[in-house]
Image: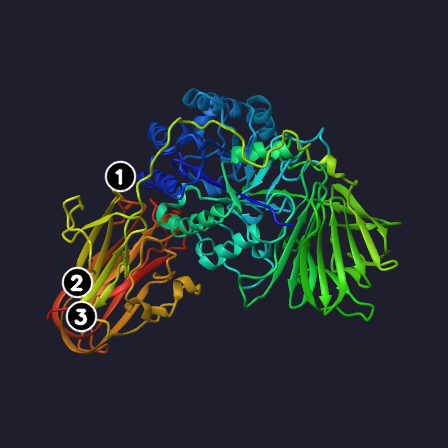
Amino acid sequence: MKQTAIVNIYHFVRMSHVEPSRFIADDFETIRNEIILTKQHGFPGTYALKYDALMDSRYQALFQTYLDEQDEISAWWEITEPLCRRAGVPFRGKVSAEYDDRVDSAYCVGYRPEERKRLVDAYMADFFGIYGRYPQTIGSWVLDSVTLGYAAERYGILGGAICRDQMGTDGFTLWGGFPNGIYYPCRKNEFVPAQTLEEQIPAPMFRLLGPDPIYNFEQDVREGLQGVYTLEPSWLTGRDPKWISWFFHCLCEEESLGVPYAQVGQENNFLWENIRPGLGPQLGALRELANRGAVRVETMADSATWFRSRYVRTPPMSFQASQDWDTDRGLSAQWYASCWYRVGFLGEAGRLRIRDLFLYREAYPSRYFDRPMEGRGSTFDALPVLFPQAWGQPRPFLRLRTPEGREPEGMVRYTARDDLTARAELWSGAACLAAFTMEPHAITLEGACTLVFDRLPVLCGVEGRKVVLEHSGCFRYGFQVARGILRQTGPQSLEIEPEEGAALLIFGNPVRREEIFRSHEGATDGVGELAGPVGKTFLPPPMEPEAEPTTSVFPWGIPAQVRLTAREEGQIRYTLDGSDPGPESPRYGEPLVLREDTAISARLFLPDGRVSPRVEFPYRFGLTDLEVESPTVLDHRPVFHGNGVRDLLSAQRGSLDYLDGRWRGTLEDLDLRIRLPERRKIRSISLGFLSHHRSGIVYPQWVELAVGPDLEHLRPYGRITLPCAPCSREIAKRDVTFQVYGLLGAFRIYAHRYETMPQWCCYRGSEHVFLMADNLIVTPLD
């Protein structure tokens, strides 16, 4: 079955990422740009406000001006000292502490249940005082059932949102819940679906960040993976055009059950320079999908309203990737989840295996249901039957074994058969070797293969046809083998042999279709009719002109051409003297010819009077026929290593985005030795550096230059010490330039990094100080 996918463009908004909060212009401009880009593509957005952004008059004015009736303003649930003070709750945090280090104070699970309700009351009172209504959705990396249930019952919250599955990132472990999409959580455990209406919170929960159905769930068990595999636009995967196309194909074109869902967007603290490279391509892809009806882009409140109108209980879901975007690995995957369990299949090298299996029981309470968390890390989980991330090496699977004792190989196929049922099959030619059929309460394995559990640390024993398990030494659960021969083959291992060609594993009670779906009377396939915060329409400015090539270093003495283009019909006006382009500035027509260092400034002017923001493209000229070598060890990741220090002579310059592939990074001092092809009079020598302290990148403490006729006869020339102080912007770059005016044949540049992050930095005191350089620019005197 193919379904129309739902996408929420959901930006969570913080005034500050530190406590106490302070206004930072870069963060403010980031959310403004996110709003503009979203509207340039014609989409509604959901903007979830942390308390500091809710209460700041500048953010209030921004949303009143830029948002319109199709948008949603909602709540982002992070706890601040002013919110605690407003609620009369003791704040558990410390002064000037980073949020990533404060799970127990910056999030609701760090507070007692009665305190959580008072925090909700305080936030809602101030939200109502500003916007004249209560928010309709509430989200956070972690959101407990007490907070969500109380907000739904007292203030009419329609839905909640929590983070995707991850292991330990930023102090959060969430693993085993609904793999993606939307579900009704239970009252004792926000992380698992309820099985009964009595224990169900009527506000559906959305999983955030758009996880890769293959690699997000290979974390910690597969070598060679780097970073995160989600739609987060600030990281490499979420900005890769190939991956973006593949992900939306999985979401919109693959067969699926339930609600194919993804969240697009990023918190503003990642800053615009790192968000735009991924958010722009994602919104462009969504625009094409929306134009042909493959996806509905709507607010989270609209999606929650639609979900509640259509489903009485959590519907089964499936999410699959029949082919891998990484063709070298060639994996495939399918996920199935219901109110009773989730199962993950992995296809690799012709084998079909179960790689993940968790059971859902509404009697299994969250660790923080009735008490606050302790320590620096939080854990949200379900009841494991297969949990390789926690069970160590060798990695365990649930495997198939033929009567001959081998693991079968063939072609893996995944299908969604109807509203309730999905299948994972292994074929050899015209013969089906094995087929798993997933129903809401059970899995049936058809064929002659035995199902083998590699390792089952939670196994207590086998009682007839029942497998008895125990999690964390305190909660007992299990499943039934209604058909098949069940054998315990060791203290932590099982196998289930088929009976008369099949085995049947029962995980819960049968669920009828009418228990899940509401009557079609009154149910809608479209979005709900929800009033937005402002009864008007905001017309965004056009996108800025683009340049080809982008900011570059051209070969010395050779004229270069730069072309300007725009995505909309209008006039591009430009200047070359650093002034702001206006309606009387030169109109771009032909490629611009440059012969010396030049900064091109440009704007796009539309016929309706709208004008794009100003954009600037600086260009330099320098020698390119140099030899460079270095003993410095660069970061091994391709995005920071590339072809090594030779890339410092490449044409393209690094942008303010440290992941653009043009910055060469190291955790050592940067030591460069350069030879000229012949002795030459040199005017200046420059090396570009990046500062982005939120990502652990800081300018060098000082840079030294030594010059001479060759590398064996260098003499010290000078040292430039850079200020140990914040830059005027959170992300900045600068060229450290030595005016030489001398004859030389070789030189050495030595950039000394800080041993620990300075006190004004985000990760002050950390020894992991990145030094990043882009271009070595040598300008001759002739």
In the image, what residue type sits under mark 3?
Answer: Ile
Mark found first going from the N terminus, 3 or 2? 3
The image shows residue 427 at horizontal and vertical percentages of 72, 65
Instruction: Name the residue at 64% across, 32% down.
Output: 369
The kind of secondary structure element at disc 3 is: loop
In the image, what residue type sits under mark 2?
Answer: Leu
The kind of secondary structure element at disc 2 is: strand
In the image, what residue type sits under mark 1?
Answer: Asp
Which residue is nearer to you in this view: 323 or 32? 323
Which residue is nearer to you in this view: 708 or 439? 439
In the rendered image, which residue does mark 1 sit on? 608
Residue at mark 2 to residue at mark 1: CA–CA distance: 32 Å
In the rendered image, which residue does mark 3 sit on? 558
In the rendered image, which residue does mark 2 sit on? 594
Q: Which quadrant of the figure has residue 498?
A: bottom right
Display colour scheme:
rainbow
Instruction: Name the residue at 58% across, 26% down.
Output: 152
Residue 194: mark in rendering: none
